[in-house]
Image (cartoon, rainbow, N blue to C red):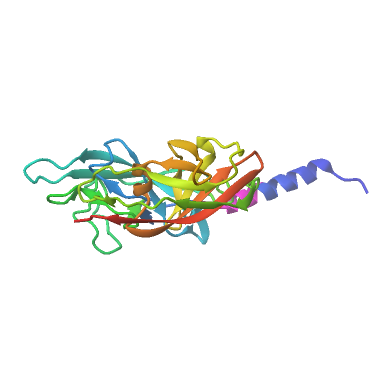
Amino acid sequence: MKIDHKKTFLLLLILFVSNTYAQQVMLKKGTTIPVRIAQNVNGNIDSQGDTIFFEVMDDVLVDGKIAVKKGTFANGKITNAEGRKSLGKAGKIALEIRSVKSVDDQIINIVRDKLGSEGRKRTGATVAHVIMWGPLGLFAKGRAARVMIDTEYDIEVESDLSINTAANGGNSSNSPDVENLDVHFKKYNSKINYAKGKIGKDFKLNIVLPKTTNIARNDIKVVEILGHKLPKPIVPTEVSWNKKTKTFIAVLPFREVVKYSAPGTVNVLVNVQVDDKSVLQGQTTLTTKWKMK
């Protein structure tokens, strides 16, 4: 039986195009996306121009297909940050949510016009005077202006966008092997004065590995806090060997840890890359006391 290769090719091409078209959906202007702010923002600690992150809380579905995945990070900016001043004047801070990525890695622009609509804060009152569509105005008399992690909002898609839902969202199947690691924080005795936005002492993490282990600063990464994956891993500012405890000591910057943490005891997940094929992973807790008023 003679095979007509041209007809076979055309048939396969038609099937491919039909399948691709079937996976295309239109994300409509005005579609709302539920997000939580993925970090704390404090007008005395953070600066104007800093990037801030929000996390998509639920899959965004169009015609039953995922257009934006749960867990995707939306990008924003601090557009204004003023620290506390003398005479009891409070700080001020203004934020914007700007964009989030679709499953096919396209940028979805978010409405930023403050005249568009008033955003709906979905959780209890942690901050006051939140305006969603332009800068988020936050004012706290006598204290540093702040927005606390896990505050939830609805954001709005700025314009129609055609999305290929067949895309995998950039998942990688070549992950290194993960082994258990013993890590623990040195007790943190200082009280964190978050109400005034004061920078405190850095945190020290003990990593139980033989002295002969060849690890550098960039091999150590805090990847989760409070059960949430971080938008960017926290890397220590320095690493040293402690003869007394026979552990490596990684110094983690105050600003970065506090950005993703909360008062009390929080879970922390740490990865240490020991070679090209192996990652050691350790779960520990960090306990701190915060002054919030």
Residue at position x 13%, y 46% in the image: 90
Residue at position x 44%, y 60% in the image: 58
Taking the image as drawn, is residue 72 in sight?
no
From the top left corner, tell me how far across and down residue 77 is, in percent: 32, 40
Q: Nearer the viewer, residue 181 or 161?
A: 181
From the top left corner, tell me how far across and down residue 140 is, in percent: 16, 51
Q: Which SS does the magenta portion mostly show?
A: helix
Q: Which residue lies most toward the right here?
A: 1
Taking the image as drawn, is residue 182 in sight?
yes
From the top left corner, tell me how far across and down residue 183 is, in percent: 51, 51
Q: Nearer the viewer, residue 14 or 44?
A: 44
- What is the magenta range? 17-25
**Magenta-drawn stretch contains 19:** yes
**Magenta-drawn stretch contains 262:** no
Q: Which residue lies most toward the left here?
A: 87
From the top left corner, tell me how far across and down residue 248 is, in percent: 51, 42
Residue at position x 64%, y 39% in the image: 275
